[in-house]
Amino acid sequence: QVQLVESGGGLVQAGASLKLACTTSRRTSSNNGMGWFRQAPGKEREFVAAINWRGGSIMYAEAVKGRFTISRDNAKDTIYLQMNSLKPEDTAVYYCAVGRGPTASIVAGAYRYWGQGTQVTVSS
């Protein structure tokens, strides 16, 4: 079983930045695509960003494109989500996930392991 631990969430004002990190418990993730999803209160979980195993293929949701940046450090079994120009609508619990294969995907079903989530709250 792979465990994922997210960190970096918090309460910020609109326009601020946060950087989330997700570290996995063992090196499975270095050969797999990884992604970030989020779930706001009363809404379904939605795709945010994904990166393939090498970091050469990246996908973003339209709502975050140009503001968020996903990256990974395979030596540290960690992925990151740099979030700039945060908006109140970015408020959600953010989850990282390890893919079933090496590619990036926008589909939640393509991910096998999930973290517990970290809360991001953006005030107006």
Image: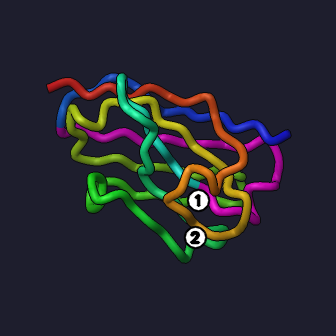
- Crowding around mark 1 (Cα neighbors within 10 Å: few <14, some 14 to 19, many 20+) is many
| Kind of residue sitting beneath label 1 | Arg
Q: Residue sitting at 33 percent across and 23 percent down?
A: 11
The residue carrying mark 2 is 55
Q: Earlier in the sequence, mark 1 or mark 2?
A: 2
Left or right: 93 in relation to 101: left
| Secondary structure type for disc 2 | loop
Q: Residue sitting at 45 percent across and 38 percent down?
A: 45
Q: Is residue 5 above or below residue 28?
A: above
Q: Residue sitting at 42 percent across and 35 percent down?
A: 44
Q: Residue sitting at 35 percent across and 47 percent down?
A: 83
| Secondary structure type for disc 1 | strand
Which stretch appears magenta? Answer: 15-34
Point out residue 8 in the picture as x, y percentages from the top left corner: 48, 33
Left or right: 29 in relation to 47: right
Q: How many numbered circles does the render carry? A: 2
The residue carrying mark 1 is 72
Separation of residues labelled 1 and 2 (CA atoms): 7 Å
Whether residue 28 is visible, yes or no, is: yes
Residue 88 in the magenta stretch? The answer is: no
Residue 27 in the magenta stretch? The answer is: yes
Farthest-out residue, right: 1
Point out residue 10 in the picture as x, y percentages from the top left corner: 39, 25
Point out residue 1 in the picture as x, y percentages from the top left corner: 85, 39
Colour convention: rainbow
Q: Is residue 15 above or below residue 104?
A: above
| Kind of residue sitting beneath label 2 | Gly
Mark 1 and mark 2 residues within 8 Å of each other at the beta carbon:
yes
Farthest-out residue, left: 124
Q: Which of 33/72 is in front?
A: 33
Point out residue 29 in the picture as x, y percentages from the top left corner: 74, 55
